[in-house]
Image: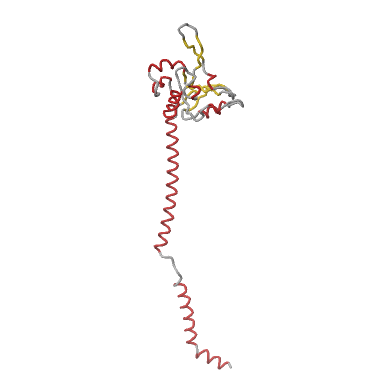
Amino acid sequence: MLEKLKYYIEHYKQYRYIAAGIVILIIALLFFIQPKQPVNEVQEKNATEWNHKDNLKNGDNKLQSAKKDTQETQNTNSKKVMVDVKGAVKHPNVYEMSNNQRIKDVVLKAVPTDKADLNQINLSEKLVDQKLIYIPEKGKSGSNNLVSVNSGTSDNSSTTQQKVNLNTAKETELTTVTGVGPSKAKAIIEFRESKGSFDKVEQLKEVKGIGEKSFEKLKDYFTI
């Protein structure tokens, strides 16, 4: 039995080497034929990722720059103005504000009372220096706050005419002034909406339908 085993080992020895070689060859082929991503695709993928990161970085830099420019522009154009707030507020006072702010900003500082009628106030209007803002109470006209002036007559008798605020008065309040009818009142409001707030009473001469003579008659009855 041992003699036969030795015989087979010696006789088929060459086939053993062949089988081992075949196994090694198969392993080598399996290793080398695995699919690999082309170099160009890898480079293109990396380049795309880098470009995306660069775009995000550049976008953040541009956003920060835009915010900085906006803040610098606001600071450059901003001027301090003094605004007097009276009427139905808890803290009537003269407030230092920015001319970029609106009436609502200073009204919130003054804290409106429960009786305040904010519907009579144009809260979106920009602030101007030396502006008087009167907050009327509900059920009362905003023109009640205005200073009374004397209207001269030929017989030296006088009646009182309250000054009307060119920037806050509604059409009905404007028409309370002698010499101002509905058409002129609408022209004043249109001028205010298109040109912005009146800076001085003399700007009335720029309103359509109000010339030099009309202005001389009306100027004492208006304020800003």
Task: Give the image location of residue 37, x and y in percent.
Answer: 43, 65
Residue farthest top in this picture = 155
Of residue 55 and residue 132, the one placed in the foreground of this image is 132
Q: How many marks?
A: 0
Q: In the picture, which quadrant includes the N terminus?
A: bottom right
Residue 143 image position (x, y, % from top left): 53, 20
> Quick check: 90 left or right of 22?
right
Q: Residue furthest left?
A: 212
Q: Residue furthest front?
A: 182
Q: Is 32 situated above or below 7? A: above
Q: Position of residue 167 (x, y in %)?
A: 47, 24
Which residue: 47% across, 12% down?
A: 151
What colouring method underlies this structural image? secondary structure
Residue displayed at 45% across by 15% down = 220
Residue at position x 42%, y 34% from top? 73
Residue 208 placement, left or right of 120: left
Q: Position of residue 80 (x, y in %)?
A: 46, 26
Task: Report the front residue among 120 and 94.
Answer: 120
Check the image and report above or below for 158 versus 201.
above
